[in-house]
Amino acid sequence: MADITIKKVNLLILLFLLVINLIFSAFLIEELIDASDPNYGVTGFFTPIIGLISFIYIRKLAGKKKILLLRVLQLFNWIFIIFPIAVFVYGILIMVNY
C-alpha cells in the first residue's frame, strides 16, 4: 500500500495560484489608480483568500525543506494577503477623515 504521509509539493498548482493572484492584484491596482467608482467590487478580496490557500498549501506540504522558489512564493503570499487588507483599512481611514 502507498504511504499517505509522503508529502510532495506540486509546483504547477503553486504557479497557477500565483498567476491568479497576479491577475486579481492587477485588477485591484488598476482600481486604485482610477479615481472613478469601484468597478470590480469584492474581487479585490479574492487575492488574500487565494494567497492564504497557497500559503497553507506550501506550509503543510513543504515541511522543513523549503527551496528558494518556495520561500519567494511565501513572500509573495504574504504580500498578497497584506496588501488588499491594508488598502481597505487605508480607505476606511480616509473616509473617516483621520
Image (tube, rainbow, N blue to C red):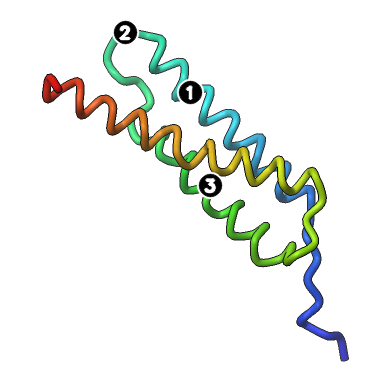
* Dot label at residue 27: 1
Graded by Cα atoms within 10 Å as few (under 14), some (14 to 19) or many (20 or more), the crowding at tag 2 reads few
Per the image, label 2 sits on a secondary structure element best described as: loop
Q: Relative to 82, does residue 52 appear above or below in the rendering?
A: below
Quadrant (top left, top right, bottom left, bottom right) of the C terminus: top left
In this orientation, which residue lies closer to the viewer: 88 or 31?
88
Residue 21, given in percent of the width and then of the height, sits at 57, 36
Count of numbered marks: 3
Sequence-earlier tag: 3 or 1: 1
Quadrant (top left, top right, bottom left, bottom right) of the N terminus: bottom right
* Residue type of the residue flagged with mark 2: Ala
Instruction: In the displayed orientation, state which residue is furthest to the bottom.
Output: 1
Graded by Cα atoms within 10 Å as few (under 14), some (14 to 19) or many (20 or more), the crowding at tag 1 reads some
* Residue 18 lies in quadrant: top right
* Separation (CA) of disc 2 from disc 3: 26 Å
Per the image, label 3 sits on a secondary structure element best described as: helix
Taking the spot 83% from the left edge, 85% from the top edge, the residue there is 3
* Dot label at residue 50: 3
* Dot label at residue 48: none
Taking the spot 80% from the left edge, 65% from the top edge, the residue there is 8
* Residue type of the residue flagged with mark 3: Ile
Taking the spot 86% from the left edge, 86% from the top edge, the residue there is 2
* Residue type of the residue flagged with mark 1: Phe
In this orientation, which residue lies closer to the viewer: 58 or 42?
58
Graded by Cα atoms within 10 Å as few (under 14), some (14 to 19) or many (20 or more), the crowding at tag 3 reads some
Residue 10, given in percent of the width and then of the height, sits at 79, 56
Q: Relative to 42, does residue 52 appear above or below in the rendering?
A: below
Per the image, label 1 sits on a secondary structure element best described as: helix
Residue that carries the numbered disc 2 in the rendered image: 35
